[in-house]
Amino acid sequence: MLKSEFPDAFRQARKQVGVEQMDDQNDPVQMVLRFQDVRKCAHNWKTFQSGAEPGRIVVPSEVAIRSIRQIPFEVDPPEHKDYRALVEPWFKRPLDAKYTDKLRLLVDGALDDAFSKSELDVVTEFALPLQSKALTVLLNTPMKEADTWISWGTHVFRSEGEALDSDKANLLYDYLDDEIERALKDPADDLYSLLLSAEVGGKKMTKEEVKGVMILTFAGGRDTVINATTNTIAYFAEHLEALRKLKRDEAAIKKAVEELVRYFSPLTHMGRVATEDAAVCEHAVKNDTRISLCWASANRDENVFENPNDVRLDRQNNPHVAFGFGTHNCLGSTHARQLLRTLIAAMAERVDDIQLLNANNNLEHWGGVTRKVGFHQLTASFSGS
């Protein structure tokens, strides 16, 4: 099997049952697996809410390590609309040509570094630094901040062998407290300052609300972007001809990005909490119990996607849900898409060859299912100009 192959872990349960049961810290989760069911539940925010106890909709639950609500991720309408309207213009900035130019400089720098080494770990020496440096562009903060974020590793809430790590989470919380105080004393043209000067519902945002937005920004787009970057490199290392065909073809690159995020689905699922007794796929869901919207399973649903386990970079019908669906679709999707498009464009122009030397798969265990989501380590050698 190729290193870039990601088996459909949920196929049997999706076809036969439609759900998968799992336990999460004694708070069970019923995973919703079929495309249509996932979209219906995501759309029905009144029955399946995001605005539950902070941390509870995340799987694994983060209730034990945070009490601050991530905004607007853990807020439901109508309040969600006001928060989203405030931050959405900032997160649409990646559509600007100058923003893309900055990303291209970062990608070219990452490739230059890869070309200069006999081999490197794509996860920690390419994807993690690139994600961290690109985040400075999104936040409009000094590039030196990326060094701190790189030191945290690939996940801000987890460490090796630990589903959740409160000590590591506190590094982020303390860092954000300091940055919020800095922005209060010396406002700049960054996201912190924008939030601190903003009003929602006629009231100025509190420090805790600002912190909630920033926690989401750091946590939501970290390991997912690192996975997407690493998996994309793994794929094109084993399909170089496909990469060469994309050279200077912007439309084809956009389609390729959508197909790769569908296939890899960097985030397996996201939870919701039932506000009343309900049913999913004829399975009972009790009030105040959790479901999860399994994006990874929905994106391989054979009733929606033709040959879903094949990567078709020119796939025409591709309504994937890798960035979520409905009210709470991913706020950082524009940034993630633009980074991946920029990476593929640069690789198509500059990379002659990538040899994958060693791989340590990152496997997730959900109930009776084991899913490959990326790599803990992927050693490769790059050649190009």
Image (cartoon, rainbow, N blue to C red):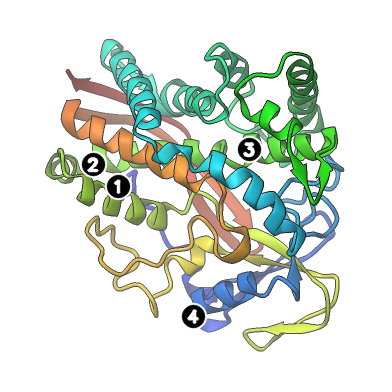
Position of 305 with respect to 49 (left or right) is left
Dot 4 or dot 1: first in sequence order is 1
Q: Is residue 191 above or below residue 119?
A: below
Please tell me in which quadrant of the rendered image residue 49 appears: bottom right
Q: Position of residue 300 (x, y in %)?
A: 42, 67
Query: Which residue occupies the extreme front position in the image?
Result: 202
Q: Any mark on residue 217, and which? A: 3
Between discs 3 and 4, the one toward the N terminus = 4
Distance of label 4 from label 1 (alpha carbons): 25 Å
Quick check: can you spot residue 274?
A: yes
Q: Which residue is mark 4?
A: 15
Tell me: residue 305, above or below residue 105.
below
The answer, for residue 361, to whether it is visible in the render is no
Residue 172: x %, y % from top left = 73, 27
Per the rendering, the mark at residue 2 is 1
Choose the circle earlier in sequence order: 2 or 3.
Answer: 3
